[in-house]
Each structure stands twice: as structure tokens, then as C-alpha cells.
Amino acid sequence: MGSSFGKLFRLSTWGESHGGGVGVVVDGCPPMIPLTEADIQVDLDRRRPGQSEVTTPRNEADAAEILSGTFEGKTLGSPIAVLVRNKDARPEAYSEMSEKFRPSHADYTYQAKYGTRNWQGGGRSSARETIGRVAAAAIAKKVIAQCFAKDLEILPFVESIGTIRANVDTATVTREMIESNIIRTGDPDSVEKMIDKIKEVRSDGNSIGGVVGCVIRNVPVGLGMPVFDRLEADLAKAMLSLPATKGFEVGSGFAGTEMTGRDHNDPFRMVDGKVRTTSNRSGGVQGGISNGEDIVFRVAFKPTATIMSGQDTVTTGFEDTELKGRGRHDACVLPRAVPMVEAMAALVLVDHMLRQRALTGESNSLDE
Amino acid sequence: MGSSFGKLFRLSTWGESHGGGVGVVVDGCPPMIPLTEADIQVDLDRRRPGQSEVTTPRNEADAAEILSGTFEGKTLGSPIAVLVRNKDARPEAYSEMSEKFRPSHADYTYQAKYGTRNWQGGGRSSARETIGRVAAAAIAKKVIAQCFAKDLEILPFVESIGTIRANVDTATVTREMIESNIIRTGDPDSVEKMIDKIKEVRSDGNSIGGVVGCVIRNVPVGLGMPVFDRLEADLAKAMLSLPATKGFEVGSGFAGTEMTGRDHNDPFRMVDGKVRTTSNRSGGVQGGISNGEDIVFRVAFKPTATIMSGQDTVTTGFEDTELKGRGRHDACVLPRAVPMVEAMAALVLVDHMLRQRALTGESNSLDE
Amino acid sequence: MGSSFGKLFRLSTWGESHGGGVGVVVDGCPPMIPLTEADIQVDLDRRRPGQSEVTTPRNEADAAEILSGTFEGKTLGSPIAVLVRNKDARPEAYSEMSEKFRPSHADYTYQAKYGTRNWQGGGRSSARETIGRVAAAAIAKKVIAQCFAKDLEILPFVESIGTIRANVDTATVTREMIESNIIRTGDPDSVEKMIDKIKEVRSDGNSIGGVVGCVIRNVPVGLGMPVFDRLEADLAKAMLSLPATKGFEVGSGFAGTEMTGRDHNDPFRMVDGKVRTTSNRSGGVQGGISNGEDIVFRVAFKPTATIMSGQDTVTTGFEDTELKGRGRHDACVLPRAVPMVEAMAALVLVDHMLRQRALTGESNSLDE
Amino acid sequence: MGSSFGKLFRLSTWGESHGGGVGVVVDGCPPMIPLTEADIQVDLDRRRPGQSEVTTPRNEADAAEILSGTFEGKTLGSPIAVLVRNKDARPEAYSEMSEKFRPSHADYTYQAKYGTRNWQGGGRSSARETIGRVAAAAIAKKVIAQCFAKDLEILPFVESIGTIRANVDTATVTREMIESNIIRTGDPDSVEKMIDKIKEVRSDGNSIGGVVGCVIRNVPVGLGMPVFDRLEADLAKAMLSLPATKGFEVGSGFAGTEMTGRDHNDPFRMVDGKVRTTSNRSGGVQGGISNGEDIVFRVAFKPTATIMSGQDTVTTGFEDTELKGRGRHDACVLPRAVPMVEAMAALVLVDHMLRQRALTGESNSLDE
């Protein structure tokens, strides 16, 4: 019940970090969308562990196999199943976890909720689960481009690591700028400082958090469903469903709460025959519906819970004890979080595009 | 499709600010819960306009009528319909809106999405829509108390208005402290400053934003559904679905991104035979599931969009123009946002309680 | 949870037969559909009690009030709430029911399921609940005509009452033929016999069942969603959700099970440039998807459970007793079942039309 | 969107008859249920082709692999993914289908709906898709037995093949009687006649339909959700979602429409301290809710569409042509339909059991 997402473009992810594999079924993908495994692999490669010197050394090729839903290179309209086998699992690294709850992990809450857990890794709480999301989103992006908005761009980037803040202009940042460095920040000047920070905390057996910013450009007007399924509400849910997230803000966000309406409102002006706003404190969403301006939001990621030093915890038998982290982990999830944020944004958008098409036959009704 | 919320305790709100009325249908409420109109009215009164000198003067009694779903003072298990008639509607105050889009309102996006809108007020984007949510949540709170957690307390409070920050300790704040003042802040020392601030911006025809903090106490362990329906993800969606919201953070939130794992992790200790954490940067949720600690989150509300001074905008005929706000509006939504935040939190919790009971027959599995 | 229907055109009905009223909220209706209360009233009048000498004498005007979702005579795209007050309720006729379960009614099962029930009438199990369905379907039919298939006709008719079978040709029957008589059969020769039969069983304090046949003409090709949401599966569910139904068959139905494939298959031929079948044992649906031929199905209605003679039953205190029916009831539900069957068919169709439009932007993909 | 079933025990099936394989993801299975691949395999073996002389010779071992959701032999509460690879696919047998629509198959409607189809077999319309359902239902049956009703029995059986009717007493038929013969009828006297009939039509290149009857014993009182999700409505949808089905009836069914209420009503009597009915024309369901009596229903299956003789049809280029069936097919689906009917019944029941547990914490409320 909790592993499915979307109303029309509906995905169900499955799989534990240590088990037969992970994957996804997408039920509701439109037919006749060109799709091959290579389309999915490119995003899985951006997400996979071991991709650079600042990510976990767990070495998974994460090769995707499309098991169903395509024929002669195009989608059939039937469910698309994608499978990625687990290869480099080392459950023996987790033997201590069978008897101790890792602090600020999901060990205790999973045990409390279900009365059991797969202690050979994080199980479902592992970031490995996001493979299914990224695979589904790769398909979603093809649908968006072919059916709804061919110029739409989803550009998340690392905005901060710890207290190091990148200087990124959401109006001008490009995918090339972001992908040109292993941090995936849009600010070349911050790259080295961020790499050094990650190496520093890692060598100390420690970890660090950060913020992912995101801009979405060329969004059709009219996406989002009042009153509960507002676009920003669904984005908030999507982002907070990612592991290690603690916050979401859109447009002016928390800083906007200090402003007055006179300073905060976005005036409308006609520009090239289109209704535009001369500022964008709304962040591209008004009344829960996209207004055609850039959608801008930020997501907070806490520091990785697994650290290589002793911490107070309790045993599964409910006695106080101490635990020292083991296994292979990211000291900072931010670089790998970028494709995850992108994935969740794409999944929210494609679903609302399909819902809007159901409602009016178009992505928006203004020009009719 | 977008006006329904919840998987098991499912509500559908309906109604425009200027029309026959507003209301809600709750489909999925358990039977045998004592429920009268008075149970609902008490929360509607906390939400209603005209309740104090810092809220809009629109004068609505907002009297709730239960049309179905109860019998001899208890719920039947059938849908509960609640109706609140609109009384003090003044559509004439909005005549100019029929031809101009109000900046940072939903006028333009509704028109773009639907090709029409009820311009006699905010329609569905009006805070008046939240009457249905508050009514449904009044029922939800009865269900929680009777079936799941009789001591559970949801305590939202005004944490800041503009740059004025209240000093509230989430561990000790009480409902009495919050409801003892018209701002609904938990800090007596801030009340006068906040009242003055609201009066100041209002007399200037301006408006101001702020932050609502919230603590939920005595939460059962085990609520929340990995991976998409994490408790914090559903809370984020719930809060961002409220009008005028721009951000959500749980536990350490954005501030936590600057910390290292060693400082951020919440150690476990056994206390009185229970698994507890000695700090609560997780905000009561780990791996998407409640851990029994206080759930703590914050919600950002932007300044009210309607201000009483001229602003640049465009006409529905797509020409540049100017618009000056009219009508009766809150200069600051924060005092009335408190019961709305409480409502959405209750709706998220009751749904997850029912889902957990479906899954295991209990609210958590640890003690079995 | 169980009082909602449809994925995109989603309705939630509410209300007991004896209480504040009954109604419906439709969430997901497209905008800009002309809609007035008169559009709804016409179908409610076909459904209402007291409409003819063969229906229950309970006298309800069943006047519909649209509370939300329309503006200047058109739908807004927001939820449409429709309210019908109960007027001629006589709960005193049911006092005995508070202590005895009526045989073949829902009294016992409601009590067992919920631990309570509204014994002042049938509560939710009353056919009165279908008011909400019929009101929602009146809206659905407007949407179908305006957005999808202006010539589509849904023509249910009484095919049999007891052992009296009407001779109706689904290829030629018209609404005028059906509505020209109070039985709503398409066969003028059977009308008197059926009226007499109903009067006969009624005067005997008895009741009688029957079959409603239905043909749907001018259905777009391509409606229905493999594999679970096949069009016939959703029709079956829709029909079996009506009170007093015991069976559903489409096309050749149970009789087709006795045939061989060679006799049963529907050959394809090109006719006027369109793919047609030269027979229609499929009943207009192949592989769960409409093929453009007439959709033909039948629905079995059992005899009304309330009869005016003593029957064995048990008390709510679990002792054997006897009960004699009271209150005002239809001796045969068939004439009033016709608009209910029509309503459910319209609700299934509009939902699949919206789903198909979401999927491909059109109601079918063949001509693109 | 259409390949998912259930509200709480939610399955998504995927896979075409000719492709990487078929399978299912179950999202919402309770934790701590003992489950191994052998539990699933036993039902897949009852469903698989090539199992006897009266089924298609396509030879598939249909070996199930559980990819996720279990740990140390028990369910985790996380999604359970089951994969069955396709082995004996012979797409070359279908080359003619790429250019011609098979009569009374899904070829034309799939092409019309999606603008494409996998013509190398039936794609999603193949009975091979039901592997995912049968696998999910094997899990469902374990949940039912462990959590809700350990003595519950779902016993479908072949009631007729063509005009040959078995004489089966639903009150006494046993699984042993049904599984003791390759027809899976509960009447030993009919077995040979039915086998002969199937061989006869097959040797003639023809096919034949039939009816599956089903009795479900020891059903808890209180399952089913008024008003749309009545137990019989969900059973009807479940059964009509199976390939080749044309009808469904519960209890007295179509025959009951000829009865009067006095003859049809099921009187209540106290028996061994329980509320029982002395007849069961209701078929175990009253007001949409199980009453504790045997649930009895019947499902109509049409003759297999693929026959080995020339038939009129049209080409994908829309010209009249003729087509002669090829490939390996069942001349009669009934023996293999039995486990499919059982599967769908189990899926409906487990979902309603979980929903009832959510609502009241118990499977029924009567004894509290």
C-alpha cells in the first residue's frame, strides 16, 4: 500500500537492498513512447553507488532489464516491469545489526511496525529502493517530452553541503554545469570545497548533510489539482518520501514568511503575448497550479546516519549497548540525491499532466 | 479527483466561498464513535472568520449540520456528510475580479486550468474550503481518542509572525497556553508584539506571513508506510495543501543539513522499559515511521496576497492593468492557520492508524 | 471507503433513508459543462417513489439542490455537491425493526459489521441511496455528450418480471418506447401483463423479481482497461452494487457457455470503412475493451425482501421470533431499477472515457 | 492503471505472453506470514498449461521466483515481487496475426485503444497474465488462514461444459473430489463425458464454453462495504476481469428473478447460538455484506476464441480477409479456469478482511 505512487502514471517499487533485486512496475504509461533499456540505464548510472570518489564504494552495475510493456522499441500501454539484480551484497557486514538498532536509522521503527525486518542492510529503507523510482522516472521523462512538453527541463543541483553554499542562479544553470562535476552543483567555485568537505568527514568516520535546489523550466500552465493535490503538495510529498529528507520549500519558502504581501506578491505583466510575473516568489505555483514560471524548490537532506564511531543504542532484546557503524556508505548523499530529486519531480509532473489531459483534453485550457 | 484526501479515512471537501455553502463527506469513519454537531462546532469556531480583532471581519457563524452517518449520537460506519451554509457572502465586492487577475492569487491559474472560475471570491482557493477539513478532523480526533491513542495531543502554535519569533518549548507547551491568546502562540511574551504587528500591517493595507510550529505528543510507535507514504511525506503533503503555505520541515529540518551525523544522530536508550531517544532531531519519525517520540514540524505561511494598495496585473482579456484589493481579508492568516494545521495533522494520523490496524490488527507490533 | 465510485469521475454518495437527506459529491467533473438543477431533476423524477401505480406510495419530491461546483450555468471543475432532503420519512413504521432483523434484508449484516445500524428504514441499504448515483450520472451523461460521444445512448428496459418476458429487440428499441409505459419495458404487448402481475403480488402482500436488459449504442472504440478494469468487469461491479441485484451477463452470457467457438465467434467485416462484426455475441466488448458494437448486458433483480406476511426471523437479542413487514415498499423494483441501471452504466462509461483521454489524448487511437 | 487490483492487499500484474516473463507485485501484505516459493508453486501448477490431456500442450514449468518481501521464510510487510520467466514461447506461430485481427480476440480492440499491440501471442489478453493473480492469491490464502479465518475454504469446480452439467452439491463438495479429476468437476459421473466432449471439439478444431461454480465456506460475518464495494459487486468485477468470462450470478441469480419474495426470502433461525438462515438464496451475502452462510456463485466462460478453421476477419490495413487459427490453445478453458476463479475470490476476500480489520479492529463486530 505504501510502495505505490501516482494516480494515473502509477508505479510500485519493490525490493530490499539485500535480496533478489529491486525494481518497479509502472501501470499507466501511455502507449507508443519510444523506450529502450538504454533510456533507463543513463539515469541509473547517475544514481548508482561507486560512481565517483565521493560516493559509497559499493560496486553495483545496476543493469536494468525491461521485462514487459514494450514491443519493437515502443511502449505498449501495458505495465512496464523493470528488474535490477543485486550483485555486490555483503550481508555479513550487517550481522551485528541483527541484534542492535542503528541510531537514526529505520531499524527500530521497522521492527516496531512489522515485528520483523531484513537486517542484512537497510531493507526497504535503503537508498537502493530508489532504483525503481529512477527507472520509472526515466520513462516518465520520455512521456513528458513526447506527449506534453518537449522543452521541459528538470534541473536539481547541490546547493549546499554542510555550511558550504553554492552560488547557483536558477535562471541560468544548465544540466551541463551540474553534471560537469562529481558533486552535481551548478557552481564551479564550490566544487573543490565540497569534495574536500566530504572527504574530510569521511576520513573522520563522520557524515554531512546538505540541500538540493531544483528548477523546472518550461512547465505548462495549469498543472496541479486543488485542493489537496496541489502541485507543491504533491512535490512536497514526493521529496519527503526520499530517504534522509527533512524539509521542503517552494518559491520564497520559509524566508518568505518574513515578508509583507506588498513585497511578496508577484505582479502580472503581459510579455510576448503571455501572462508572466515580474518576480517569482510563488516559485511557479499559485493556488496549487503551475503558472508557467519556473518551478523552484529546495529539499533538505540530513547527514547520513551510518557513521564509523561508537554510538549509544539498544539491543533488539531491549538493553542498552553501543554500536559502531560498518559497511559501505555515502558520507554525504547529496551528489546521488540529485537524480533522485529529479526522478520524483518527473513522476509528479507526468501524473499531473495525464490528470489534466483527462480533465480537459489539453494540458491547459487557456488558449482554447 | 483533487478534493479528496486519505486512503481509509477518506474525506471529500466541496464548496466555493460564494455559493450554496461548503462541506465535507467522510467515507471510512469507524462505527460507534460518539459524535454530535457540538464536537465539530468547537473546532469550526476556532477556524471561523470574525473571531477576534486580528482576523477578517467577514462574519460567518459557520454552523455545522450533520446530514448523515450518525444515529442516536454515534457514528454508523456510513458516510458522514457535514454542511455549512454561506451567509455573509458579498460577491459585489469582487466585481472587479471578474476582469482582472489578483496577483499571487489563484485567479489566473484557475482560469488557465479550467477555462472558467467563480470570481465572486476565491472559489475553491478560499480558506473557506478548509471548513470541510476542520469538520472532518474533528471527527478524526474523536476516532483517534476512542480507538487508538486517547492521550494523543496535536498542538500547533504560532511560532513567528514576520520577524517576530515566539519562544516556545515544544516539550512543555499546552493547549491552554496556546488558546489563551488570540494569536495562538505558546509564548505570552510575544502576544502583544504580534498583535501590534498585525494591526500595523493591516492599517497600512498590507499583510504579513509567519510560521506555525507543531508538536504531537503520545504518538503510537509504528505509524507511516514506507516508502512513499512515509509519515513525514504525508504530513508534508497535508500541510502544503493548505492555502498560502510555502514550506515544511520536520525535526532538525533545514538547519539539520549543516550538521554532521555524529552530532545529528539520536542515540537510543532504554527508559522505563521503553526504547527512547535521548535527543529528537528526527522529529519523531525514522525511516518514515513514528518512533514514539514527539513529532515536531514547522509550516511556512506566506503573507496574504490580498492587499489594499494598487498592484500591477493583467486583465482576463490579456492587457496590462492595475488592481487595488477590496473585500474582507485577514492581514495575517497565522492565528486561523493553527486549527487548520491541527486538522491536517489529525487527518494524516487517523488514516495511518487505520492503515496500521489493517496491516497488523494493532497500532504497532513491538509488544506482541 | 465503500461509498465512492470511479477513478477520475469520482462520486461519493451519502445519506440514510431516514435522516437529514441524501446526496452526492462528484470530484473530477470536467469544467465548462452546462449544468442546471433541471438536468438532474429529470432523472431523479424517473427514479423517485410514488411516480406511478406500480411503485411504492412513499411520496418524495426528491428535489435536487446543487450546492457547489457550478457558476453561471456551467461546471467549474470543482466538486459538485448535490443535496436532496428527506421529507416523507415515517420512522415510526419501523419501530419493530429496532428489535428484529428483517429476512433477506441488510439488517443483520449491518448490525454484525458495524455493531449498530439506523433501524428507521433501510439506512444506507435503502434504494434511496441511489439518488446520489442518479444525480451524479445525470452530470456524467452531460459530460459524455459534450466531450466524448454526443450520440451515445444508454437504453435499459424491463426485460422480464417474474416469468413474464418482454420481447425487446436491442437493435431497435428506443427511449420513447421504454418511457411510454410505467413498467419501462420496450415491448408494448407485455405492459399490461406486467402491471397486472405487480398488482397481483402486491395485493397478496408478496413481491416479484425480474431482469433489466440494457443496450448502449454509439460507444467509442477503445474503452476499458486491461486487465482488471475491463469494461465488462466494471459494468458488472456497477450493476451488482445496486440493491437487490443477483446477476450480470454481457453479450451471450450464460447461454453462450453452451456454444462452440465456431458458432460463438463474431467475424469481422469492413462496413462503410469501419471494422464491424457481423454478429455480436461479444456484447460490444472484446478483451475488456469496447469494439464499437452495441454493448448489451442483463441484470438480475431478486424479489423485494419486504413482504406483508409473517416470516421467521430472530431478534437483535438472538431469539427466534416472527416478523410481518410494514412500511411502504415496491412490490417490484424493476420499473424504478431502469434509471438506476442507466445511471451506473453512465458512471462506468464517463470514467473510462476520461481514463482513455488521459492515456492517449483521444477516446481511441485507431484513426490517428 | 488497469493492471492493479485491491485497496489494501494491492497487486499489480505485469507481463505479456511472449516477452521477458510475467509476474506480480503485492503491496500491502501483512508481515510475519510464513511464505516460500513452494506455497506459490502449488497453485501455479494447477493453473499451468500442459498439465493434462485436456489442456493446451504449451509446456511451461512456470517456476516462480520470489524476488523481494520475504526474509527467513516470512513476509516482511514490504512488497512481494514474484517473477515467472517465459520459456516455451513460439512467436513464429503468430506471424500471420501481425496483419490480421483474430475474431473475438482482443487484437482489434487493443490496436484501437493503444495504436499498437504485441501480436506475438495474446500479449496482456493471454491467460498467461493470470499467473500473477494466482501467485498473489497463493499469498492471500496464507494471510486469510493465518490472520482471519483458518477454516475458510474456496472451492470452485467445473459445473458445466457445453450442455453437459455436473451434479454438484455445494454443501458437500470437497477439494479432493474436485482435484481428483483433470476436469476439476465435483461430480465423478460427469468426468468422462466432459473429457470426451473436450476431445471431440478439439479434434474438430473447435472449442467449447462452460460454467464454473464456486462455494466459499466458513466466511466471517461482516465482509463487504456498502454501497459500491459490496462483496458480491467486488466478486463480480473480479470474475468478469478473468479472460473469456461473460456472466456472474450469486445465490439465486437469474433464476431467482422468477420467484416471489415469499419463496425467495431466507428466514433467520438461531442455530447453536448463531444467527443462521434456513435457506441460502442470498448466496451468503445480504446488503452487500457476508452473513456467514456459504457464499455461492457461478461464472460463465465463453468458448475459446481460437479455433482451427477459417473465419472471416479483416487485416490491420482494413481489408476483408480470412484467418485460420494456429498456435497451441485450450479447446476448453474450464479446467484451468478453476484455479483462476479461486485466485480472484481469495483476492477479494483478503482485501475485505483487511478493510474490515481497519474499520473495527476485528473481522466482525457482532460478538463484541
Image (spheres, coloured by chain):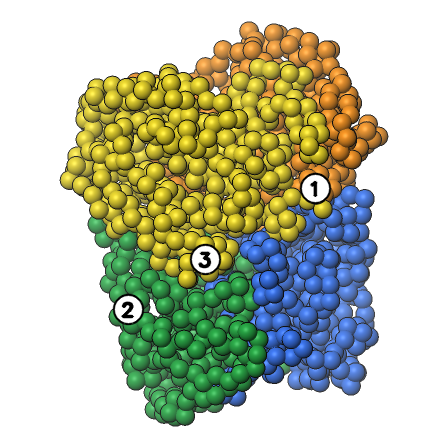
Chain colours: A orange, B yellow, C green, D blue
Q: Dot 2, how many residues are within 10 Å of its Cα: few (below 14), some (14-19), or many (20+)?
A: some
On residue D121, the disc is: none
Residue B39 in percent (x, y) is at 39, 48
The quadrant holding residue A190 is top right
Find disc 3 in the rendering and name its residue: B75
- The chain carrying label 2 is C
Q: Can residue B338 be spotted in the picture?
A: yes
Q: Identify which residue is drawn at 37% across, 16% down.
A: B163
Element under disc 3: strand
Q: Identify which residue is drawn at 66% across, 18% down.
A: B261
Q: Is residue B206 above or below residue A83?
A: above
Mark 3 belongs to which amino acid?
Thr
Residue C324 in percent (x, y) is at 45, 85
Q: Depth check: D327 or C165 in front?
A: C165
On screen, residue C184 versus residue B323, left or right, reads right
Q: Nearer the viewer, mark 2 or mark 3?
A: 3
The quadrant holding residue A36 is top right
- The chain carrying label 1 is B
- The chain carrying label 3 is B
Element under disc 1: loop
Find disc 1 in the rendering and name its residue: B366
Q: Is residue A360 above or below residue B312?
A: below
Q: Depth check: B196 or B249 in front?
A: B196
Find disc 2 in the rendering and name its residue: C87
Q: Give the alpha-carbon distance from disc 3 to disc 1, as whole Å.
A: 31 Å
Residue C336 in percent (x, y) is at 37, 76
Q: Identify which residue is drawn at 32% across, 71% down.
A: C89
Mark 2 belongs to which amino acid?
Lys
